[in-house]
Image: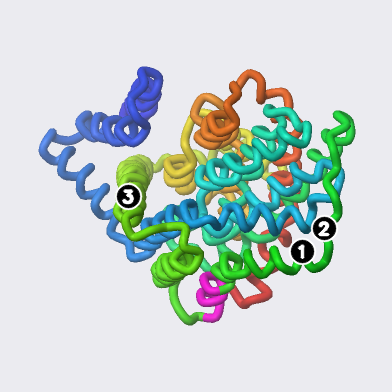
Amino acid sequence: MEIPILVLSFLILLSIGVPIAWSIGISSLLTMLVSIPSISAFTTVTQRMATGLDSFALLAIPFFILAGQIMNRGGIARRLVKFAKTLVGALPGGLAHVNIMAAMLFGAISGSAVAAASAIGGFMTDEMEKEGYSKEFAAAVNITSSTTGLTIPPSNILIVYSLASGGVSIAALFLAGYIPGILTGVFLMIVSAIWAKRKGFVTGKRSKLSEAFRSFLEALPSLFLLVVVIGGIVAGIFTATEASAVAVLYCLVLTYLYKEVSFKDIPEIFLSSVGTTAIVMLLIGASMSMSWIMAYENIPQNITEIMLSVSDSKIVVLLIINLILLFVGVFMDMTPAVLIFTPIFLPVVTKMGMDPTHFGIIMVLNLCIGLCTPPVGSVLFVGVGVAGTTIQKVIRPLLPLFIAMIVALLMVTYVPGLSLWLPRAFGF
């Protein structure tokens, strides 16, 4: 009785436009009210929400969000675009490659796909239009490439997965994300080159070595943040949470040196970060209450038995999971999807001998596609808004880029070494 109430109430609340965090919390509460007295139900749900947020690792999220907000305002995007242009601007579809590479770099540094779509897209869309690229193609490239930074560390969503999985090493997840993230970016560049060649888009001029070196020096302080954060975690100098605080301090010093953020801008940056953090934390708290109810009702164990009874082939089971997650990603934001479906699917794949770190990368890479699709795709809406176009017009150039992302997903799914080689090389 409880499970149909949980599922139906959640779907009904979502369909009438209730925000997803409230939909999760209310449906969890309604489910508890069926089986226990009201006071106990309210107490249990609130306790589960509070307990879910009582994690030292979660402190990394507000710090990384703040670091991303500082970088978004500090002129870092412009320097990364300039550096990327000297590297790949002369290739077929050069400015599309610049957009992809800059989004990969900025997304990795900021840990936010929305920030990357806003910062890089706001700069690159006009540049691409000047060179004869269509506005819709520029928007499509920006939307899809902005998600690559969610697998290339530091990534808040990988921290969320670590929490939902019961403690998979954040350092191992960070290292595991590099090759899949870069691979996705390379596939997007291949598709962009083919599209640009077919449409006859202009190829940029080859940069001089001195110009490339100068742009590299300008971007180096921003790029060095990755070395500080990831290097510090891997070397055991500090934890992921401590690394996030170091990232904030580093970004503050960097923006002071760049002189593109004044002291009067700081309160606005902090307030924006607090707002974003509050949304994320409410989602996490509500999702943890739902996850507890599902565990209480033995849903993960039942789903494990059902899926393994369908097939004992790892290839088939992983394909089914990927299809479900692709469908879920269309209708649900990434954070609650990771928190709700990790406890459901992780027991299935671990029973089949899959490494939880590998599965985490598969899940995040899969749900990145959902960020680019209507009706919930936050990156899609930001990218379209920045480009000043419509979703209907962007769909056609988006489709081949979607295919590139799905091919990358399938490769990462069925070739574990793409995710696990780096963590194992560093002893994780």
Whether residue 233 appears in magenta in the rendering, the answer is: yes
Q: Which colour scheme is used?
A: rainbow
- Nearer the observer, disc 3 or disc 2? 2
Is 158 rendered above or below residue 100? below
The image shows residue 425 at horizontal and vertical percentages of: 68, 75
**What distance separates the C-alpha of mark 1 from that of mark 3?**
35 Å
Q: Nearer the viewer, residue 70 or 356?
A: 70
Residue at mark 1: 211
Tell me the quarter of the image containing the N terminus: top left
With 241 as the anchor, is 348 left or right in this view? right
Residue at mark 2: 207
Disc 3 crowd, CA 10 A, few/some/many (<14, 14-19, 20+): few
What's under tag 1, amino acid-wise? Glu
**What distance separates the C-alpha of mark 3 from that of mark 2?**
38 Å
Q: Which residue is drawn at 72% across and 23% down?
A: 396
The image shows residue 193 at horizontal and vertical percentages of: 84, 41
Quadrant of the image occupied by residue 393: top right
- Nearer the observer, disc 1 or disc 3? 1
What's under tag 2, amino acid-wise? Ser
Residue at mark 3: 268
Q: Main secondary structure of the magenta part?
A: helix
Whether residue 275 appears in magenta in the rendering, the answer is: no
Q: Which residue is drawn at 47% across and 58% down?
A: 260
Q: Which of 131 and 248 is in front in this view?
A: 131
